[in-house]
Image: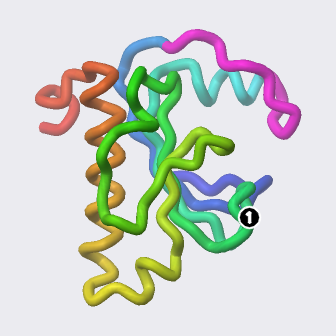
């Protein structure tokens, strides 16, 4: 787990163990930090308290490098969607807060987005998830 102080989000990242191509420059992150953070394939999920380019509190998930078909993957719950402009899946906090079972709703989002990233990128999930 990690806390991104620059955008005030809390995240957990899973790694495939395989190297990733160098990431594109990001004006919000020093190049040395960006290269180290994305030196290996990742699936990262987290929570924004109201920033991150979405404008409201939300949970998110992205993959780097993004595997083909990731943005079209079927993920749950129904309130989750892929934000093309952000390049990641978003689940509004309000949808979780108002659900009959917030923990189940959030877990569905976290598990389904990770599965989409890992399966589409052909990660060895049996070895990674033991």
Q: Is residue 126 above or below residue 12?
A: above
Secondary element at image label 1: loop
Question: Mark 1 Cα within 10 Å, few/some/many (few <14, many 20+)?
Answer: some
**Residue 120, horizontal then vertical, whole percent:** 30, 25
Q: Is residue 56 left or right of residue 83?
A: right
Q: Badge 1 is on which residue?
A: 51
Query: Residue at (36%, 20%) from the top-left corner?
Result: 17
Residue 98 lies within the magenta run:
no
Does the stretch in magenta take in 22? yes
On screen, residue 13 above or below 19: below
Along the horizontal axis of the image, is 125 left or right of 89? left
For residue 102, what is the image quadrant? bottom left
Q: Magenta part of the protein: which range?
A: 20-31
Residue under the image location 22 percent in, 31 percent down: 128
Residue that extends furthest to the right in the rendered view of this protein: 27
Q: Residue at x 45, y 31 (%)?
A: 42
């Amino acid at each position: 787990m990690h806390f991104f102080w620059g955008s005030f989000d809390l995240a957990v990242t899973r790694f495939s163990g395989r190297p990733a191509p160098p990431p594109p420059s990001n004006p919000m992150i020093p190049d040395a930090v960006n290269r180290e953070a994305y030196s290996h394939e990742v699936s990262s999920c987290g929570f924004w308290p109201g920033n991150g380019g979405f404008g409201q509190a939300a949970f998110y998930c992205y993959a780097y490098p993004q595997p083909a078909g990731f943005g079209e993957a079927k993920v749950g719950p129904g309130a989750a969607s892929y934000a093309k402009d952000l390049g990641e899946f978003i689940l509004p906090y309000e949808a979780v807060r108002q659900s009959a079972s917030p923990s189940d709703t959030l877990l569905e989002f976290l598990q389904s987005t990770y599965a989409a990233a890992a399966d589409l990128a052909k990660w060895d999930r049996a070895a990674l998830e033991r």
